[in-house]
Amino acid sequence: MRAINKIIIHCSATPEGRNDTVDDIWDWHVNGNGWSDIGYHYVIHLDGSVHEGRQEETRGAHTSGQNHDSIGICYVGGMNADMTAPKDTRTPEQKAALRELVHELLSRYPEASVHGHREYANKACPSFDVQAEAWDEGEGNRMDNTEAPDDPLERALHHAGEVGRALVELKRKASGSRPSK
Ligand SMILES: [Zn+2]
């Protein structure tokens, strides 16, 4: 078995709402690029379904210099609808599936850390800040799995850890704003 030290997240750089599939990406990589197989180990469709690409035991082809000890995950999307700018287009189903998949991989590869492609290349991929999300938390602790709320206090609470949460609760009491859900 090869050592897995990194889980690297990608987007397919396809327009928001277009339901490209693992087979499409396989075709781009094999018939387009002339590769032996799809470059990613997992592809997540818009509906949140997770599809296997390359076997985990096999070195991927997704992040230059990092393929030997990593697993590559790609969600379909990552560009706005008219393809003029990178955009975090993950559907709620894709976010949940990505979180679940990463969590499952971390349970099997506890030494691994989670990264975005852009940490290793001058690219926007995967069009969101992987380090801003908590990947090692179980299903019962998913505070950051929702959109950031509009209310500043709610937003602070959303980003706060347990200590920060207590502080925000105190501030909320002092300011008399509505209690959290
Ligand atoms: Zn990428």
Image (spheres, rainbow, N blue to C red):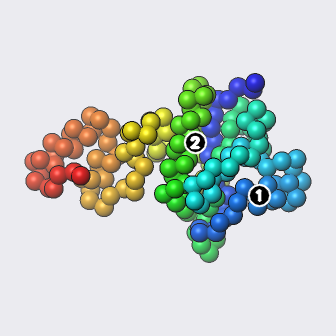
Looking at this view, is 167 or 7 the one in front?
7
Q: Where does the image place residue 58, in percent across and percent down from the top left?
A: 79, 35
Q: Where does the image place residue 140, in percent across and percent down from the top left?
A: 39, 38
Above or below, 152 relative to 53: below
Q: Residues within 10 Å of mark 1 (few under 14, many from 20)?
A: few
Looking at this view, is 115 or 46 the one in front?
46
Looking at this view, is 16 or 174 the one in front?
16
* Residue type indicated by callout 1: Asp
On the rendered structure, is 179 left or right of 39? Answer: left
Question: Dot 1: what SS?
Answer: helix
Q: Where does the image place residue 101, in percent across and percent down from the top left?
A: 57, 42
On the rendered structure, is 39 left or right of 15? Answer: right
Q: Residue at x 55, y 47 (%)?
A: 98
Residue bearing the label numbered 2: 101
Q: Residue at x 14, y 55 (%)?
A: 177
The residue positioned farthest toward the bottom in the image shown: 82
* Residue type indicated by callout 2: Leu
Q: Earlier in the sequence, mark 1 or mark 2?
A: 1
